[in-house]
Amino acid sequence: MNTQKLLPVVTSIAIILLIAVLRDRSRTLAAVFGTMPINMPLALWVVFGSSDEGPVAAANFTRSLLVGLVPTFIWLIVVYVALRAGYGLGIALLIAYAVWAVLMGIAYWMGILTVAK
């Protein structure tokens, strides 16, 4: 595995470890790092870092990331509402992922999530 492919994985692991360390010291900083836009730059890096595709292809991919953020934000709202309603974390996450999957499926079915090559 070359550095181009290894660095995003190492970066993700480092951020997860940072959040684990911060959770006991500062939940606010843990939340900040937890909501950091790291997956999107890593996805862009992995998909386009070693390819010959130009900025138009990257822009189309980024548009799909924008579309994907809507179900993701709704996922977070569902988790919050479920936890406030007294559900445990596991059930709240399952409900939220079910809602997220339906919304992502709808976005794909409508053709707004598809990235043209």
Image (cartoon, grey):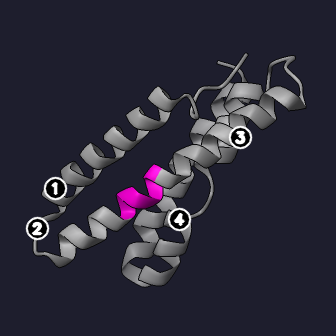
SS at badge 2: loop
Residue occupying image coordinates x 73% and y 16%: 117
Which residue is label 2 attached to? 87
Which residue is label 1 attached to? 90
Q: Amino acid at mark 2?
A: Tyr
* Above/below status of 109 relative to 88: above
Which of the numbered marks, if any, corresponds to residue 65?
Answer: none
Q: Earlier in the sequence, mark 4 or mark 2?
A: 4
Residue 116, x across and y down, in percent: 70, 20
Asked whether the beta carbons under mark 4 and mark 1 sit within 8 Å of each other, the answer is no
Answer few, some or many: residues within 10 Å of disc 4's Cα (few below 14, many 20 plus, some between 14 and 19).
few
Q: Earlier in the sequence, mark 2 or mark 3?
A: 3
Q: Disc 4 to disc 2, how far (Cα)?
A: 22 Å
Q: Nearer the viewer, residue 47 or 19?
A: 47
Q: Earlier in the sequence, mark 4 or mark 1?
A: 4
Q: Amino acid at mark 3?
A: Thr
- Magenta region: 71-76
Q: Disc 2 to disc 1, how far (Cα)?
A: 8 Å
Q: Nearer the viewer, residue 54 or 41?
A: 54
SS at badge 3: helix
SS at badge 4: loop
Q: Amino acid at mark 1?
A: Gly
| Residue 115 relative to residue 103: left or right | right
Q: Nearer the viewer, residue 12 or 79?
A: 79
Quadrant of residue 32 in the image?
Answer: bottom right
Q: Earlier in the sequence, mark 1 or mark 3?
A: 3
Residue occupying image coordinates x 29% and y 63%: 78
Which residue is label 4 attached to? 35
